Image (spheres, rainbow, N blue to C red):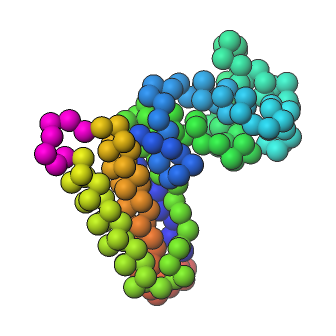
Amino acid sequence: MMGISLSIGGLLGNADKGMPLDMPGMDVEEAAHQTALRCPGGVATLAERMGVNAGTLQNKLNPNKSTHHLTLRESVLLQRAANDHQVLQAMAEQLGHACYRVMGHQDGGDPVEAFMHFQRAVGNFTCANADALRGKPDSSRNELRRVQEAAAELIEKIGAMVAAIDARVPHRPPQG
């Protein structure tokens, strides 16, 4: 099965619900530090899960230390070990993008079901936008949040549609 990752700038929300983090301007180093602070068991637990020395990891996550730095590989390990993707979100935001969690199939593998879920998401997105724009010069934060959530749902369903079609394509083994 093919994995799908989409990135769209300008949207804010909640990473755990498939939407980007609503923390404008968070620095990636601060995000790594916050990841350790939020993790039950802290740096010691993370270091054990990552297979690294706890003292070294502590130094790498300390925002007041300029002599130790987290590598890209360690950043991925950290986020996996903590099940916290704030570093990814902060990096994407600094580059003008947003990340969305790729969700698994919720259609039982039926491509027609996937298509119906996609169309329902299109309708929800259309309604959220129409409600936010209709008859007034300004939109509320709640209307914006609803549009953001509908956008995230639509992106998820687009990914599911692509995966459903990909699953129907006969894949030939590489010749060599």
**In the picture provided, is 55 more to the left or to the right than 169?**
right
Between 24 and 52, the one nearer to me in the picture: 24
Quadrant of the image occupied by residue 38: top right
Residue 142 is situated, as x and y percent measured from the top left of the image, at 36, 42
Residue 162 visible, this orientation: no
How many marks the image carries: the answer is 0
Quadrant location of the N terminus? bottom right
Q: Residue at x 33, y 50 (%)?
A: 147
**In the picture provided, is 150 more to the left or to the right than 102?**
left
Between 132 and 118, the one nearer to me in the picture: 132
Reply above or below: 77 against 101: above
Is residue 134 rendered magenta in the image?
yes
**In the picture provided, is 72 more to the left or to the right than 82?**
left
Magenta range is 133-139
Q: Main secondary structure of the magenta part?
A: loop
Between 76 and 45, the one nearer to me in the picture: 45
Quadrant of the image occupied by residue 158: bottom left
Residue 137 visible, this orientation: yes
